[in-house]
Amino acid sequence: MKFRNGNKRKSIIPGFGLSFGVTITILSLVVLIPLCSLVVFASRLSPAEFLNIIMRPRVMASFWISLSTALAASLVNAVMGIILAWVLVRYEFPGKRFIDGIIELPFALPTAVAGISLTHLTTTNGWVGKVFYDLFGIRIAYSWLGITVALVFIGIPFVVRSIQPVLEKIDSQYEEAAMILGADSATTFRKVIFPEILPALISGFTLAFARCIGEYGSVVFIAGNTPYKTEIVPLLIMAELQEFDYAAATSIALAMLAIAFIILSANAILQSIASRRISGLN
């Protein structure tokens, strides 16, 4: 960048060439090389062998369990995340800072600890699980529902932390103007606030979905790990590795990598579309 007198502005960080080189090197060592090694190892298999592994009934059942529970948990987190972010931004109450900090607990807490805690709470003898089993006959732990509960716990910070900064930046004058023009609270939220937070909501939902698909530590204890019923894909990969079937483990892992790439690509596309629509409305 140049000033009006023609002199170049000095950058605080080193030049573009050096910065770009360091960035690519770090990205390659941390992300690209490990992922490429996975692709290279899987390429030793023929397409028929790869499909034969992926299409096995046990593998397909595991993919269905992982994807369905991750989707259900992410949808719950999308609704809960909006409510939590709204309360934390728009209201003042005792203990607000504590609640705001505890939202990030799933990031800091070891996933195994979370899994053990949730399992103890949701078994038929646990505080929560006993109530649901005695009153409704619903088993939470060692079921599809138990996996979803664990994934809700893991994914909620992604949605809250994505929406919260956007809500903080929304000027309350827009809401006041909508109220003056006769809009009720629901219409104001739908027409004024929701379009503004939609890109952040899409981002938080997608990140939570991607995180939930690959979750292992907090799910392995509460799932029960029954093949065809509560066996998730990461656990199946570990089982294949323990049996020294590296080809099967790599193939399943590569399929998971492809799914994650598709999800993140869809996230970028949806955010771009939502941002353009908001720009057009403004």
Image (cartoon, rainbow, N blue to C red):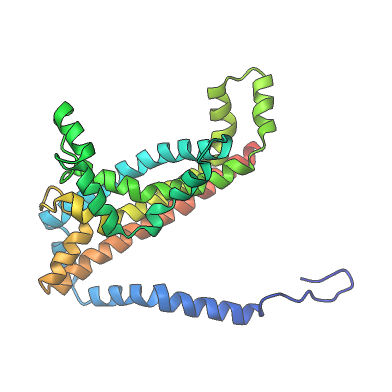
- Report the side of 209 relative to 60 (left or right): right
Q: Residue 89: x, y in percent?
A: 56, 39
Task: Name above or below for residue 214 compared with residue 140.
Answer: below
Can you tell which quarter of the image residue 5 is in?
A: bottom right
Q: Residue 189: x, y in percent?
A: 55, 29
Q: Quadrant of the N terminus?
A: bottom right
Q: Residue at x 27, y 43 (%)?
A: 149
Query: From this viewpoint, which residue is outermost toward the top?
Result: 182
Residue in front for this viewpoint, 128 or 164: 128
Q: Residue 193: x, y in percent?
A: 57, 34
Q: Residue 24: x, y in percent?
A: 50, 77
Query: From this viewpoint, which residue is outermost toward the front?
Result: 94
Report the number of numbered marks: 0
Q: Residue at x 11, y 50 (%)?
A: 228
Query: From this viewpoint, which residue is outermost toward the right?
Result: 5
Res 237 visible:
yes
Q: Residue at x 52, y 37 (%)?
A: 94
Q: Residue at x 67, y 26 (%)?
A: 176
Residue in front for this viewpoint, 96 or 281: 96
Can you tell which quarter of the image residue 138 is in?
A: top left
Res 270 visible:
no
- Report the side of 214 relative to 160 (left or right): left
Q: Quadrant of the C terminus?
A: top right
